[in-house]
Every structure is written in C-alpha cells, then in structure tokens.
Image (cartoon, rainbow, N blue to C red):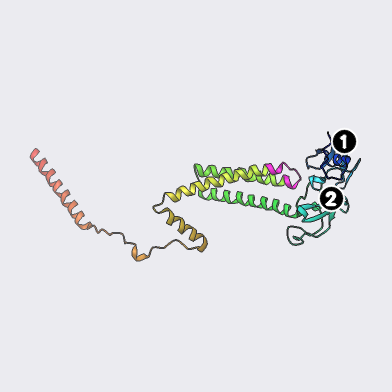
Amino acid sequence: MPAPRQPQGSTRSPATHIAFSRTLLLATDLQQSILAELDRSGPNRLAYTAYGSQSGQGTAGTHLGFNGQRRERPTGWYHLGNGHRVYNPVLMRFHCADRLSPFGKGGVNAYVYCGGDPINFEDPSGQFAIISLLIQRLETIALHLGIITATVTTVVKTRPMGLALNAARISLVGSPISIVGAGMQLAGYPVGAIVSNVGTALSVAGVATRTFIGAQDILRQAKPWQYFRNGVRHIWNGNSPPQVPAAAIPNPPQVNIPMNTVQSRRSSVTGEGLTASTQIRRNSR
C-alpha cells in the first residue's frame, strides 16, 4: 500500500500516517465476533471466553470485538446499547443495574449478562431478559391452545360447511405448528422460530378467512352499517336482542266449522243417493 502524502504544516511522521491509514480484513463467526484480522504484516488471531473476554497474538487493531460490539481498548469493556450500560467481560456482569429490574423485563438479577447463558444468547442493547423470553414462549403456547379449544368448540356447536369449515381446519393445523415451534425455542433450537412463524401464518390465514365470511354476512343485510354497529354495541354493552311485545303478535285466526250441518248434508246426500239407487232398481225391474 503506498504511503499517503503528508499534508503541509503537519508534524505527523510518514510512519504514523501509514499505521493510521492501514486496511484490515476481518474474519467473523455467525455471531459477528471478530476471530481474526489481516493486514500487510500478517494475520492476528483472536479468541474469546464464554463471556467475551478477548485475547490474541497481538493487540487488536479493530474496535469491534465480542458479538460484533464496539470494544473499549484500554479496559476491554463494552458499552452496550450505545452507552446504555457498560458490560465487563472479565467480571462477567454489568457495572450498573438494569432499570427494568427486578419487577420488569430485566429479571430478578439486575446485573446478569444474557441470563447467565452467553453461548446461546446475546445482548446488544443491554436490556436482555431471558425470563421475559421464557414468559413469551409460554404465552404463545397458551394462546394457541386457547385457539384450538375455541375452534373445536365452535365447530362442534355450529357444524360449519364450505369455506368456514376450511378456515377452521387451517387454524387447527397452524396452532399446533406454532406450539411445536415455541417448544423448540424453549429447548434451544433456533429453527423453532421459523416453525413458529409458519404456524402463526397459517393461523392468521384461518382468521382472515373467517373475517371474510363474517364481512359477507354483514353485507347481505339490508342495512349493513347499522347491523355492524348494533353488533359492536352488543359486544360492549351486552344488550339482549329486542323482544317483541305480546300485544304486537296477532292471534292466529280461528275457523268454526259447523259439524252438525255437514253431517246432515252428508246424511241427506246419502239418503238421496239411496233413493236414487232404489229408483234405478225399480225402473230396471
């Protein structure tokens, strides 16, 4: 690399300019931790403890370190969250307490780093809480168990057909997949997040289909907006459907049939028939 020109009036030596303007090629792992740096003089390999304490063949030329975070050279500290909290990898803890602890998302231990598990987790913001992640996974499982229960109960009661039945089937497929994904994340498998997202997408598709069916039912009404508004009021107020007063219901008409007259007519007709038949017989003689 050619040495840069020394500006006029500068007291810095050319060697200092060369050291100041050198180019580094950095090699990282999946967590963006710097494992090696390469310049004209050769490679400089770096290593880290589980909590991020750095060591190497020589002094690191880059400001980046553990998990790709900016490292303070003289002390080796990390100012996570753009200075939100200072993390000391030698002490394996933060210098100051988490303001979200102990009753918030920070957890009980206000100084812990990554919930005591820096191998599987990282904390770029300085506000990590493994307890909150555990609660979120359990809430996801409980939510989808509720969706399964509600869907099965509704299907058994209403016996839907066609598109509504397919929507229920989609929800019954998506929710178990989300539960499996949340369980995989609790077990430490990162692919569980993808599985959970797939299940959630299927559940959302089922809900969207039900919403479409409900919108169609509303639009079929004579006054869709009024029908929708009354339904929303019923949700919040719990009003029962309007009852029709008894006086407004007309009584069914009553028809009186004179049975005696009919019988007399029948008897007279029968008598006439008998008389006619007798006359025919007499004429035939």
Examine the rendering and report whether any part of residue 285 can be seen.
no
| Residue 241 against residue 31 in the figure, above or below | below
Q: Quadrant for residue 46, please give it.
A: top right
Where residue 252 sits in the image (x, y, percent)? 31, 59
Q: Badge 2, how many Cα within 10 Å: few under 14, some, many 20+?
A: few
The amino acid on which the numbered mark 2 sits, given as a three-letter code, is Glu
Q: In which quarter of the image is the N terminus?
A: top right
Residue wearing tag 1: 43
**Residue ranking furthest to the front:** 9
- Left or right position of 243 against 175: left
Q: Residue at x 88, y 54 (%)?
A: 91
Residue wearing tag 2: 72
Structural distance between the alpha carbons of marks 2 and 1: 21 Å
| Residue 161 against residue 257 in the figure, above or below | above
Q: Which of marks 2 and 1 is nearer the N terminus?
A: 1
Secondary structure of the residue carrying numbered label 1: strand
The amino acid on which the numbered mark 1 sits, given as a three-letter code, is Pro
Labels 2 and 1 touching (C-beta < 8 A): no
* Nearer to the camera, 67 or 225: 67
Where residue 235 sits in the image (x, y, percent)? 51, 59
Query: Magenta stretch containing residue 185, yes or no?
Result: yes
Q: Badge 1, how many Cα within 10 Å: few under 14, some, many 20+?
A: some
* Nearer to the camera, 168 or 24: 24
* Nearer to the camera, 225 or 283: 225
- Left or right position of 58 against 250: right
**Residue ranking furthest to the right:** 57
The span picked out in magenta is 184-194
Say which mark, if any, is on residue 3.
none
Q: Residue at x 76, y 50 (%)?
A: 124
Q: Quadrant of the C terminus?
A: top left
Where residue 250 sits in the image (x, y, percent)? 32, 61
Where residue 41 sits in the image (x, y, percent)? 89, 35
